[in-house]
């Protein structure tokens, strides 16, 4: 007995959705169970923020109970995220909370009004239970008046969303302004720095640039002019690559020597056991008192040393031994880089300058002005520029080339959108596989197969394939954004956001919607092309099953996967055992916390909201699953942003992702109203969108003078009272900007002079002093190492039952490292041997208080960083990274370190230990970087 395609589709829609719901519900339960079981055993995965960051940025530990952690997490003040992870992270959480409110109201209203209107008193137009609650169940002309309920609900929900958007935008505006002028943020150099690109050659010197910016309130602090350093950059990259290669080779040699010695010991013990009792000697081989090159050559002979080819990608060229070749190469590059840096000031000007103002308001004024009288010059100015956020490769292109790259980048994006349509359309047709059975005969076996095969192909496979397809897309879009010559990584991320949402909207919604009904309407569209819009509106209900399953897959199972962190767990152990071969790799695995790219995550949230908006009245069931999905996302991301993620300071945008996400919600409203032909409401929504954008956008981008001057007056008056000086009323102060600017300039000038005093001392005396300090540090380090070894000599061994011949230094590291981290202390060996001035300053950094008046000890103005290399290319000042190798039980690392130093290569084995199995553990960051507590400074 055969059935028609339409009947088969109706019968299979509920089965497909039920199959998807059961499968993803089971997956969600597995993910939650895995999270509850592993949460208390894998601190590095589930709670690194409780012990890895510096104390003032640590999170509170959640209860270890299976359920008590949930209420503790929910009652925790979400504004604490601002101090831990910045305003971007908090506004993402705020966006999810906003969507929770929206879909709670949507669910209640549509289930109270739309579902009864679609079902009560009407014959069933379909045997499908899900289709019965959609508006397609209103099939008779006599029942058309019921659509007034749909119209009323759509108007009500639209006005509610617009009201909520305006309220949230007002709150965001207040929070962003308070964040920008807070002492914790305004004290940072990036708050006062402006990057200007495409600067004409006539301004290619500091004198003319200062004259150009002389109108800026408070004056100019520093100017960095970006010049051609391409030759130096190539040398710098070659040295970085050689150092990385050498570091890996040294660790390999030590690992092979350690393994060879362990094998030699095992062989020796076997021989000892075979000897008569009276002839047996010591059961273990004795190491030489002083490690020697002979021992290293014996354990790792020349054929076993690391080698590589010097040609392209290490595939061509002559084969050389890595360690001596890299040592010679680094020594030669050090000298060449030193000579090249002496001529850096004579390089060609490349059109980009960094201007740091004395006042934060001055930087905002400079960024808003029309800077040059000719087109294409000095049009692009960006605020909040952090040195680590600069894409140096994108600063050396002219105005015409940057304009061409911008056009090519977006043309390539549009071309990719078109090309991407073919695989997405195929995935969409899978959701309507029942319709294809009659027209494509070789697919008939799918329709005739036993359950759950048709339901799996139709309900689970399409959303899964679509998720995989879009997982690889951000990497392509990031390259296109980089090619556009965007000068900052954070701006690249916001560009990826726009492109990714555009892709998701077109391919994840519109094309899937059309292709879900393409087998039924293709002939109508060909015969009557102008009916495409009408067909889209008619086929929205038919595609609702696909988007219900997509909401379940991405919302419930996706949020559960984010909470369970199963992929990060797998990646962690892969990195630990396969990639953690060098101390630097081990440091990345042990100390660095993960972060999230909001430019990739937020578009997915926005797409789900757009889909739910479009189907909110057509199929009210989607509102319930959107509510559940965003509840899971809110729970997962509040946990991740408080306990796991660590967002880099340099990527902070001050919440600029939030207004972009808000604009995406308007897109969802447009699609809903357009497809149900509510043109009047569509016009109202467009007007509301334009008004909100025009009124809010200028105040979002820049700091208003009303707030900036008020804050400056308060700080000025507070400073005067602190110094015991009379306070001039604000209305009588005529030159507050100049006075504040001169005050800051005076403080910085004094600090620079004080910093130069040691350079005026006698060279001999200074050298003797440095040698005495170094000797004292070495002695102190040796005492601390001995104490650490004594503390841990038994505890680890007793706990784990490990052999007694294990390296005592390794036992000290394993016992003390994580314990010290969790107690809030760094190992004394490293904390005392480094300068703590910068670390102390960071440890006492003021909190970001967005509710109060930001009063208190006004020390921020006197804590300005004064790094003369802040916005210079790293190749112009960064020294050779130390070759960091682990301290092995044979003592060979000291021998290798001395050999490298004698060859002019900086090296050290501090803070890293290799056990007798060749596993590397670390207790700090690389030794050429300052260390205070668990913070890299």
Image (cartoon, rainbow, N blue to C red):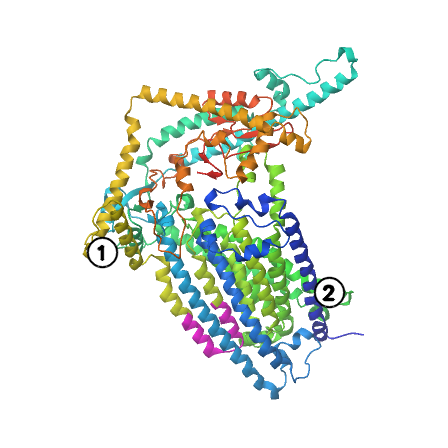
Q: Nearer the viewer, mark 2 or mark 1?
A: 1
Q: CA distance from mark 2 to mark 1?
A: 76 Å
* Frontmost residue, 65 versus 897: 65
Q: Residue at x 44, y 54 (%)?
A: 87
Q: Secondary structure at mark 1?
A: helix
The tag earlier along the polypeptide, 2 or 1, is 2
Using the image, tell me which numbered label, if any, was put on residue 176: none
Q: Residue at x 63, y 65 (%)?
A: 428
Q: What residue sits right under mark 2 in the picture?
A: 454
Q: Are marks 2 and 1 in contact (CB under 8 Å)?
A: no
Tell me the quarter of the image containing the C terminus. top left
Please provide the residue range marked out in magenta: 666-688
Q: Tell me if mark 1 has few (under 14), some (14-19) or many (20+) residues whose alpha carbon lies within 10 angstroms of its own.
A: some
Left or right placement of residue 491 versus residue 897 in this view: left
Q: Position of residue 442 (x, y in %)?
A: 74, 64
Q: Tell me if mark 2 has few (under 14), some (14-19) or many (20+) residues whose alpha carbon lies within 10 angstroms of its own.
A: many
Q: Position of residue 137 (x, y in %)?
A: 64, 80
Left or right placement of residue 497 versus residue 251 in this view: left
Q: What residue sits right under mark 1 in the picture?
A: 730
Quarter assignment of residue 810: top right
Quarter assignment of residue 791: top right
Residue 214: tell me if it is visible. Answer: no
* Frontmost residue, 781 versus 627: 781
Q: Residue at x 66, y 66 (%)?
A: 431
Q: Position of residue 790 (x, y in %)?
A: 58, 26
């Amino acid at each position: 007995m055969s059935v028609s395609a339409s009947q088969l589709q109706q019968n299979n829609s509920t089965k497909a959705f039920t199959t998807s719901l059961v499968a993803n519900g089971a997956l969600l339960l597995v993910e939650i169970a895995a999270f509850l079981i592993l949460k208390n055993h894998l601190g590095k995965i589930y709670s690194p923020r409780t012990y890895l960051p510096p104390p003032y940025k640590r999170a509170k530990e959640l209860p270890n109970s299976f359920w008590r952690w949930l209420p503790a997490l929910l009652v925790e003040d979400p504004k604490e995220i601002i101090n831990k992870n910045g305003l971007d992270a908090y506004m993402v959480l705020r966006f999810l909370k906003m969507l929770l409110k929206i879909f709670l109201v949507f669910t209640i209203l549509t289930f109270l009004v739309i579902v009864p209107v679609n079902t009560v008193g009407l014959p069933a137009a379909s045997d499908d239970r899900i289709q019965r609650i959609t508006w397609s169940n209103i099939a008779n002309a006599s029942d058309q008046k019921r659509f007034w309920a749909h119209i009323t609900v759509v108007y009500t929900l639209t006005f509610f969303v617009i009201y909520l958007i305006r309220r949230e935008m007002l709150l965001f505006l207040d929070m962003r302004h308070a964040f920008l002028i807070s002492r914790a943020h305004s004290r940072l150099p990036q708050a006062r720095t402006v990057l200007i690109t495409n600067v004409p050659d006539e301004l290619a010197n500091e004198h003319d640039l200062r004259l150009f910016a002389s109108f800026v309130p408070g004056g100019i602090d520093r100017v960095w002019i970006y010049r051609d350093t391409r030759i130096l950059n190539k040398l710098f990259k070659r040295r970085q690559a050689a150092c990385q290669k050498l570091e890996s080779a040294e660790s390999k040699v030590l690992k092979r020597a350690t393994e060879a010695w362990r094998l030699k010991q095992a062989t020796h013990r076997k021989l000892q056991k075979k000897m008569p009792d009276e002839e047996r000697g010591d059961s273990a081989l004795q190491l030489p008192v002083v490690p020697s090159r002979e021992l290293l050559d014996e354990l790792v002979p020349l054929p076993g040393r690391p080698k590589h080819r010097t040609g392209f990608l290490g595939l061509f060229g002559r084969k050389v031994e890595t360690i001596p070749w890299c040592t010679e190469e680094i020594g030669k590059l050090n000298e060449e880089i030193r000579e090249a840096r002496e001529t850096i000031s004579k390089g060609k000007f490349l059109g980009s300058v960094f201007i740091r103002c004395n006042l934060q308001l001055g930087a905002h004024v400079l960024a808003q002005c029309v800077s040059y009288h000719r087109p294409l010059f000095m049009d692009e100015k960006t605020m909040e520029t952090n040195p680590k956020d600069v894409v140096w490769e994108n600063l050396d292109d002219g105005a015409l080339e940057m304009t061409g790259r911008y056009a090519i980048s977006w043309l390539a994006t549009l071309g990719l959108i078109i090309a991407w349509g073919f695989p997405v359309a195929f995935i969409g047709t899978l959701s309507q596989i029942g319709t294809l059975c009659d027209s494509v005969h070789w697919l008939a076996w799918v329709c005739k197969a036993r359950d759950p095969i048709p339901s799996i192909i139709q309900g689970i496979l399409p959303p899964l394939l679509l998720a995989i397809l879009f997982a690889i897309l951000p990497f392509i879009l990031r390259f296109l954004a980089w090619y556009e010559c965007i000068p900052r990584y954070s701006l690249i991320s916001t560009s990826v956001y726009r492109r990714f949402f555009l892709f998701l909207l077109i391919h994840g919604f519109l094309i899937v919607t059309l292709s879900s009904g393409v087998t039924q309407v293709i002939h109508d569209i060909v015969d009557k092309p102008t009916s495409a819009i009408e067909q889209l509106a008619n086929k929205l209900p038919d595609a609702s099953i696909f988007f219900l399953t997509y909401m379940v897959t991405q919302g419930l199972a996706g949020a559960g996967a984010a909470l369970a962190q199963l992929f990060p767990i797998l990646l962690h152990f892969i990195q630990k055992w396969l990639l953690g071969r060098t101390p630097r790799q081990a440091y990345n695995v042990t100390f660095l916390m993960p972060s999230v790219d909001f430019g990739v995550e937020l578009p997915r949230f926005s797409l789900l909201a757009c889909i739910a908006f479009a189907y909110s009245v057509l199929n009210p069931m989607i509102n319930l699953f959107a509510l559940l999905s965003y509840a899971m996302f809110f729970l997962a991301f509040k946990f991740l942003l408080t306990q796991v993620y660590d967002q880099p300071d340099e990527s902070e945008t001050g919440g600029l992702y939030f207004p972009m996400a808000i604009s995406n919600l308007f897109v969802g409203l447009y699609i809903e109203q357009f497809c149900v032909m509510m043109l009047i409401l569509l016009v109202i929504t467009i007007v509301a969108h334009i008004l909100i954008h025009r009124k809010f956008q200028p105040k979002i981008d820049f700091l208003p003078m009303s707030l900036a001057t008020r804050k400056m007056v308060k700080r000025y008056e507070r400073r005067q009272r602190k110094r015991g000086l009379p306070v001039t009323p604000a209305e009588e102060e005529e030159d507050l900007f100049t006075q504040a600017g001169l005050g800051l300039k005076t403080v910085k000038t004094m600090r620079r002079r004080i910093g130069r005093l040691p350079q005026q001392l006698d060279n001999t005396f200074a050298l003797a002093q440095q040698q005495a300090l170094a000797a004292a540090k070495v002695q102190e380090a040796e005492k601390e190492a001995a104490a650490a070894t004594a503390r841990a000599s038994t505890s680890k061994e007793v706990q784990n039952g490990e052999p007694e011949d294990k390296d005592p230094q390794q036992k000290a590291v394993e016992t003390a490292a994580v314990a010290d981290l969790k107690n809030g202390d760094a190992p004394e060996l490293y904390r005392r041997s480094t300068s703590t001035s910068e670390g102390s300053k960071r440890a006492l950094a003021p909190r970001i208080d967005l509710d109060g008046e930001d009063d208190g000890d006004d020390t921020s103005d006197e804590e300005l960083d004064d790094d003369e290399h802040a916005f210079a290319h790293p190749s112009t000042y960064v020294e050779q990274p130390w070759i960091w190798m682990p301290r092995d039980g044979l003592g060979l690392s000291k021998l290798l370190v001395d050999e490298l130093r004698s060859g002019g290569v900086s090296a050290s084995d501090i803070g890293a230990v290799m056990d007798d199995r060749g596993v590397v553990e670390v207790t700090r960051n690389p030794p050429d970087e300052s260390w205070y507590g668990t913070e890299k400074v």
